[in-house]
Amino acid sequence: MDLQIDEFYKDAAAGMLLLYQAFPRKVGLYVVDLIGFEEPDEFGLPSKRHQSCLGALIWLADEGYIRYESSIRYEALDQAVLSEKGFLRLSRPVPHVAGGAELPAAVRRVQGTLAHQLREALAEGQSERIARLARLIFDRAPTSCAE
C-alpha cells in the first residue's frame, strides 16, 4: 500500500481548501495547519511527514494549481493563493452528488462542489473518498453534472 499517496491526496486537498476559503486573498499556508505539529528529527530537520506535506504544496504550485511568493523556511508558503486552474477545479460540480430537491438551488450548487465534498470527506476522515475526490482535482477532462 502506498501510504504516501493517500497522505498526498489529503495534504493537497487540505491545502487547496484552506486557499479556497481565503480566496482571492493571499495567505500564509503553514504545514502545521494541515498536519499538526511534527517533532523535528535529532538534527532539528523537519520530519519526513512534514517534508512530504510541504513537498505536496510545492508540487501543486509547480503544476499550476496554486501560486506563492516565497517559502518561509520549511514551515510555509508565503502569500499563497489558488490559481485560476485550482479555483475552477474546486468550484466545479461533482458528478452524481445527490442534492435534496427541497433545498434552495444555491445550497444545492454549493453542496455539489468539489470543495464542499472534499471538506466533508476530510472532516469525516474518509480516506477512500478523499482519494477519489482529490483525483478529480487532477482530472484533465473535468466533467460536471447536467441540470
Image (spheres, rainbow, N blue to C red):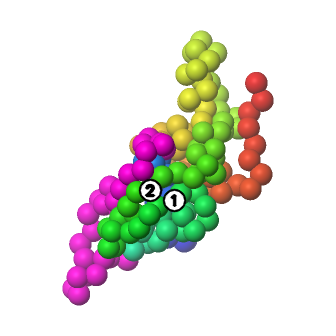
Find disc 1 in the rendering and name its residue: 67
Q: Which residue is label 2 attached to? A: 80
Q: Amino acid at mark 1?
A: Arg
Q: 139 or 85: which is nearer to us?
A: 85
The mark nearer the N terminus, 2 or 1, is 1
Instruction: Please identify the residue farthest to the bottom as the structure is shown.
Output: 43
Q: Is residue 60 magenta?
A: no
- 47 or 124: nearer the viewer: 47
At which x and y percent is residue 146? 78, 29
Callout 1 secondary element? strand
Residue 7 vertical placement versus 117 (above, below):
below
Dot 2: within a 10 Å radius of its alpha carbon, few (fewer than 14), some, or many (20 or more) residues? many
Quadrant in which the C terminus is drawn: top right
The answer to whether one can see residue 29 in this image is no
Circles 2, 1 touching at the beta carbon (< 8 Å): yes
Location of residue 55 in the rendering, given as x and y in whole percent from the top left corner: 47, 71
Amino acid at the residue labelled 2: Ala
- Which residue is rendered at x = 53% and y = 57% of the image? 66
